[in-house]
Image (cartoon, coloured by chain):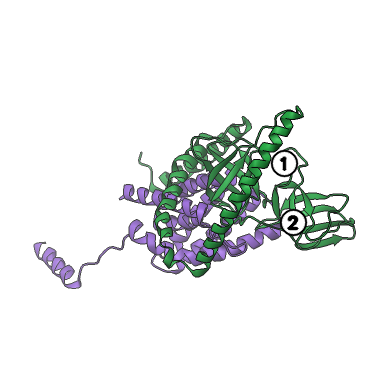
Chain colours: A purple, B green
Amino acid sequence: MILKSIVTAVAALLVAAVLQADVSVRIAVGPARPDFLLLTVVCIGLLTSTVFSLASGLLAGIVMAALAGINYGTFIASRIAAGWVSAQVARTISRESLLAPLTAMAAATVASRVVTFLMAPGSLRDWAVTSAGELLYNVALVLPAYMLLQPILRPKRVREPYERRLRRHVRRASMR
Amino acid sequence: MRTSRKDRTSLAVIIIVLLGIAFTLYHKHEAHQGRVDRITTLVQRFVLMPETRAIHGLMAPGRRFAPFYPASLIRENTQLRARVAALTVENEQLREQAQQMEEMRKMLMLPDVAPSILRAGEVIALKPSSQRDNALVTLGNGWVARERDIVIGPSGALAGQVVRAGAVCDVLLITDPQSSVGAKVVQVGRPAPHKAIVGIAQGARGSSLDLVDLPADADIKVGDSVVTSGMGTVFPQDIPIGSVTSVKLDPARSLKTATIETINDFNSLRKVFLRR
């Protein structure tokens, strides 16, 4: 199960890397553009454990730094922070609720952007405009991504029919 | 003594954070030595390059279904074919002229001029981060780009320069605020002025540049062309950049600033040429 999760998470991050490299800029609306790697980190963070989400944040940070060619520490720190934030949201809001991915995505984007600004400060206006655009785009895309990854990373347990469970319970009770 | 689940999680968190710090320090050390770190090379060459190429390859068969394309695309294709034919003829004429020029240079015993080499490259990542306007470009046939190689878009206009060499090179696009290019204005529909109007074209994100430090009396109008001035050591002169879309006068500094719309579409670059 852990191996399956690792393979799925790595594959999801690789697909996200290609989307980030090739698609992100093409679907940009003004300064608003999605961050596919952050999106994937948040989904992994929600659907797996804290360690898993931090590790995926580290991997996403390295890939993003390799793509951008600058601010290596900033990218790694901001993605790890995003992974941690999404894992914390998963502990407070039920994963079954649609509110969880939306809240986690918003919180992770804000955390990641704040870390980026603190570590590599620039024009406050540009930062605010880019952050707002990224936030909107990420929140809009998180639900489809979450629904795509949920069946693989955290499949829902199929509940047995009530009668069968009752029969088994009676059988066990009679054996005692 | 058994460790609790919480302790193990904390330990894993510390290890991940330390790994992040270690990678950053390793990258900084390698950059200080003028090298690209192995992890970045690994990610670019063995993860991004094959994946992007595979996706481009998968998308290629779809392009053959021309009847399903919109009419505007078919019209554009026809226009481009006509333009290629016209340029082929023009190219032949220029070749002849170059040959004549070469013969004349020999007759006048002038020194040989090394022709610039043009190499095609494929863009595997375009503006991946909102913090910087860059592109990762890979060259075929085992060619390796060098720092300060000039990058030209498919339309022949300036796209940027190589800032990190290698089989997968990092190109700083001219739209990045860190980029500045010596530029001059070419008046359209008016006689050329006695003094060239030169300034510095600075990146302004998106697909525009700001041509700054222009004299207040400079005769610039919307629609004028902007080309490289050749001042500085990186860009040779007369490479097209774009056209003027607006002009502003700063009365305090007595200087004009023009906004330039680039010829290249920096949101859809796929193929580029590297000029050495």
Chain bearing tag 2 is: B
Q: Taking B94 as reference, is B200 left or right?
A: right
What kind of residue is marked 2?
Ser
- N-term mark: 1 or 2: 2
Residue at horizontal 70 percent and vertical 33 percent from the top: B103
What kind of residue is marked 1?
Pro
Residue B224 in the image: above or below residue B89: below
Q: Please give the residue where the numbered disc 1 appears in the rendered image.
A: B236
Residue A53 in the image: above or below residue A33: above
Q: Please give the residue where the numbered disc 2 appears in the rendered image.
A: B225
Residue at horizontal 87 percent and vertical 49 percent from the top: B195
Q: Residues within 10 Å of mark 2 (few under 14, many from 20)?
A: many
Which quadrant is home to the C terminus of chain B? top right
Secondary structure under tag 1 reads loop
Q: Taking A134 as reference, is B232 left or right?
A: right
Residue placed furthest toward the bottom: A163
* Residue A84: mark in rendering: none
Q: Position of residue B47 (x, y in %)?
A: 44, 43
Q: Position of residue A42 (x, y in %)?
A: 47, 57
- Of B192 and B5, nearer the camera is B192
